[in-house]
Amino acid sequence: MSKVYRIGIVGCGGIANGKHMPSLSKLENVEMVAFCDIIPERAEEAAAKFGTAEAKVYADYKKMLAEEQLDIVHVLTPNDAHAEISIAALDSGHHVMCEKPMAKTAADARRMVEAAKRSGKKLTIGYNNRFRADSWYMKKLCEEGELGDIYFAKAHAIRRRAVPTWGVFLDEEKQGGGPLIDIGTHALDLTLWMMDNYKPKVVLGTKYHELAKRENAANAWGPWDPEKFTVEDSAFGMIVMENGATVMLESSWALNSLEVDEAKCSLSGTEAGADMKGGLRINGEKYSRLYTNEIELSSGGVAFYDGKAENASDVEMRKWIEAIDQDLEPVVTPEQACVVSEILEAIYESARTGKAVYMN
């Protein structure tokens, strides 16, 4: 890699500080040169911590796009702004990484796909759980046909009591939904990617607003305000694909359940099954006997040494910059992410109407 890529950050909140900027700062061939946020102090803090000495701060992303000579833009805002900013950045000649979910609505996600095609620039979505060690291993199993034809899967995104009470997470207007669009999207993306199946036929969904009504509830980040909890506390979906495969999606921020799994999937194929519960496990039948194999994914194995494995976000950012530098297809394509958004919207629509939604 010889070129140094100039990056602009739009949205300098939690996901920017917790994921994107720290991981980008580890790469030698990128510079974060512009920071934009509607709260100027956040952009200033981000620039001071992660920016170059000449980094500029903006409150208006349009001004940033017009004034800065950027190669890449990272869109890290609330969901309702993803499409508008991403499309503007693509149309002005920038590669774009947008945080998940792709957009608040499926229509906006499709507009983003069209913008990427129109501009000829690369667009990817921040589904970082694809880049975990267990995900890479499971994907390899699927690609090599170890599981056979995968005809049943579960996408897991269950929290017992972990409602995010900060920012706009509880604001349906800004986010488009609750746990389904927030963490369910990760689990669904992971599952469809493993199956390499992006052709849904019919979707049935339900959603609930039950525990959200409680005051002084137990919660990882302190009690939520029931008056501000305008999104669902849990949602579930069944997706039947065109080839007959079935995917069950479960998501919650608050649910009376001891089975807690987030950004994981379980797969059942004609030759074997695999799941991410309690580590990566492979199950099947061999020589007329059932077996269960647990895959060792740690990189240590020596006393006082835990290994040097990259975390998922570091791998995600490195692979993204490599895709641009080497003109490769991003690991997460906009077409794949768009199908995820279309299914999520269908689950919400089915929950609202009480009817199955047939996909085009």
Image (cartoon, rainbow, N blue to C red):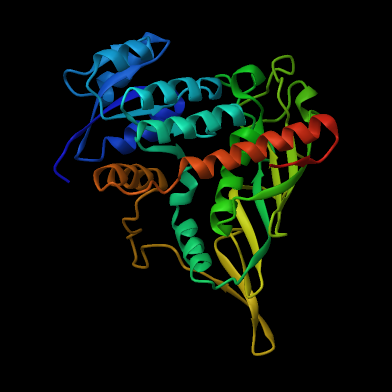
- Foreground residue among 352 and 224: 352
Left or right of 127, for residue 255: right
Looking at the image, residue 324 lies above or below residue 48: below
Residue 257 visible? The answer is no
Q: Position of residue 264 (x, y in %)?
A: 59, 52
Point 33% across, 60% down: residue: 304
Point 31% across, 19% down: residue: 35
Q: Position of residue 350 (x, y in %)?
A: 79, 35
- Foreground residue among 110 and 142: 110
How many numbered marks appear?
0
Point 55% across, 38% down: residue: 338
Residue 319 visible? The answer is yes
Q: Position of residue 113 (x, y in %)?
A: 48, 35
- Foreground residue among 268 and 46: 268
* Residue 22 location, quadrant: top left
Looking at the image, residue 330 lies above or below residue 12: below
Left or right of 72, for residue 54: left
Q: Position of residue 120 (x, y in %)?
A: 35, 35
Looking at the image, residue 314 lies above or below residue 12: below
Q: Residue furthest bottom?
A: 287
> On the rendered image, what quadrant is the C terminus found in?
top right
Left or right of 17, for residue 49: left
Q: Residue furthest right?
A: 354
